[in-house]
């Protein structure tokens, strides 16, 4: 399933106007989940499509015309005890506000962001739209586990002609989601495309950034790879990100390296969490430039990280036709440990000693 355009019935909408935010929860047409599952594919598709339409919002706007928008991605995880919890929404709230400010929009209040995320999940769960914990997920370290995807995003007011958004909408929707990487391959390839340039919007979770990512990822999949990796725009020598995820290299020296943040790299919440967890283990973690040559020569384990990716191993990296395999093509011990710890905390199998989980129901 991965991402599915099957929006849950309850959505959140807020509009900035007159110097303040006005918010509401909207309940779209629905039946019970069981009744919807029993519908014909045609009828179910029509019902789900109706939940994705809003007649009272402008079609022609700075978002639809120029891609002027930003978004977030976070998840509510079913817990082993039957409850639901969201992973670190406060950090997404900070990044969302920062992205809006970077696009010269009035920032959405961080406490309102967290509240909207919790409340949409809670209201949808009350209608029966939720994910439930399954013990079999533990067998593969939750790599195929389900969760609830929470997508906050902006839409501009109506307008045409290149301009800024002064009175944006903020929406929060929920959808079901499962494993992001569905390919049997765990190989990656360095793309020739450029994701972000200095003084650009690479540090913002801007919608426009993902056009290049989608093109590069589709080319990688076409050629049999699971993922693509971007190099810097200036020197074409330093690794920056994957298609929609941060990247880590565990070197033969025992150092874990991830590219340093700047104006071309998105500050990932999972990235931040992995750095903290790894340092707790007494390992050296560096946020610095890492060249493609160093990565190919010195890496013993590699993985990508993100809300969708979790901590997903990269078995090999191909650059200019040269393929270098890591750890004999198998998932390494550090990668496994980090993956299992992150997933274990998120799904409530391990104790949340960091206070990262915000309970929903």
Image (tube, helix red, strand yellow):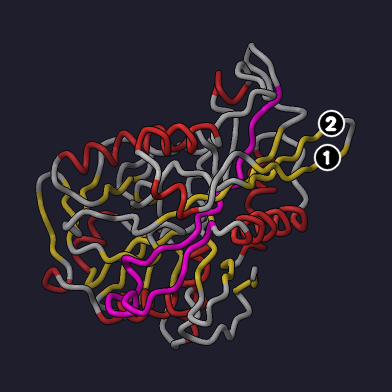
Visible residue check, residue 72: no
Q: CA distance from mark 2 to mark 1?
A: 8 Å
What is the residue that sits farthest to the right in this orientation? Answer: 18
Q: Dividing the picture into quarters, in which one does residue 134 lie?
A: bottom left
- Residue at left 39%, top 48%? 38
Question: For mark 2, what is the residue?
Answer: 17
* 35 horizontally vs 184: left or right: right
Residue drawn at x 66%, y 43% is 27
Q: Which residue is mark 1?
A: 22
Is label 1 in a helix, a strand or a loop? strand
The image quarter containing residue 186 is bottom left
Most distant residue in the top direction: 161
10 Å crowding of disc 1: few (<14), some (14-19), many (20+): few
Q: Is residue 7 left or right of residue 15?
A: left
Q: Residue at x 69, y 40 (%)?
A: 170
Write the residue at 47% across / 36% down: 209
- Vertical arrangement, residue 73 with respect to residue 337, above or below: above
Quadrant of the rendering where the C terminus is positioned: bottom right
Query: Percent from the top left, x then y, of residue 349?
Result: 46, 83
The vertical placement of 70 against 109, above or below, is: above
Q: Where does residue 282 sit, x and y in percent of width and height?
A: 44, 88
Left or right of 28: which side holds 135?
left
Q: Position of residue 285 (x, y in %)?
A: 43, 75
Place of residue 158 in the rendered image (x, y in percent of width and height, measured from the top left): 69, 19
Mark 2–mark 1 CB contact (< 8 Å): yes
Evaluate whether residue 306 shows in this view.
yes
Question: What segment carries the magenta color?
Answer: 129-157
Q: Nearer the viewer, mark 2 or mark 1?
A: 1
């Amino acid at each position: 399933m991965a991402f599915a355009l099957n929006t849950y019935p309850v959505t959140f909408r807020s509009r900035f106007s007159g110097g303040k935010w006005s918010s509401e929860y909207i309940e779209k047409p629905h039946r019970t989940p069981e009744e919807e599952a029993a519908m014909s594919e045609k009828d179910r598709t029509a019902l789900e499509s109706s939940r994705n339409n809003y007649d009272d919002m402008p079609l022609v706007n700075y978002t639809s015309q120029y891609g002027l928008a930003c978004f977030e991605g976070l998840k509510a995880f079913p817990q082993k005890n039957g409850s639901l919890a969201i992973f670190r929404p406060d950090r997404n709230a900070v990044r969302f506000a920062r992205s809006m400010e970077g696009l010269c929009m009035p920032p959405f209040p961080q406490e309102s962001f967290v509240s909207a995320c919790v409340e949409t999940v809670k209201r949808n769960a009350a209608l029966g739209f939720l994910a439930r914990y399954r013990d079999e997920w533990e067998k593969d370290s939750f790599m195929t586990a389900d969760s609830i995807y929470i997508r906050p995003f902006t839409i501009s007011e109506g307008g045409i002609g290149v301009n800024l958004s002064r009175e944006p909408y903020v929406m929060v929707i929920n959808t079901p989601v499962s494993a992001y990487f569905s390919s049997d391959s765990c190989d990656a390839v360095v793309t020739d495309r450029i994701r972000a340039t200095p003084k650009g919007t690479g540090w913002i979770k801007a919608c426009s950034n993902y056009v290049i990512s989608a093109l590069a990822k589709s080319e990688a999949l076409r050629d049999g790879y699971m993922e693509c990796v971007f190099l810097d725009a200036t020197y074409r020598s330093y690794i920056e990100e994957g298609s929609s995820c941060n990247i880590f290299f565990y070197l033969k020296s025992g150092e874990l390296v991830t590219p340093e943040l700047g104006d071309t790299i998105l500050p990932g919440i999972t990235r931040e969490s992995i750095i903290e967890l790894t340092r707790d283990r007494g390992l050296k973690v560096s946020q610095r430039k890492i060249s493609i040559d160093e990565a190919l020569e010195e890496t013993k384990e590699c993985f990508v990280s993100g809300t969708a990716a979790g901590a997903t191993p990269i078995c090999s990296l191909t650059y200019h036709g040269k393929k270098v395999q890591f750890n004999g093509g198998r998932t390494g011990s550090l990668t496994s440990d980090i993956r299992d710890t992150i997933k274990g905390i998120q799904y409530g199998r391990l104790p949340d000693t960091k206070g990262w989980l915000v309970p929903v129901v």
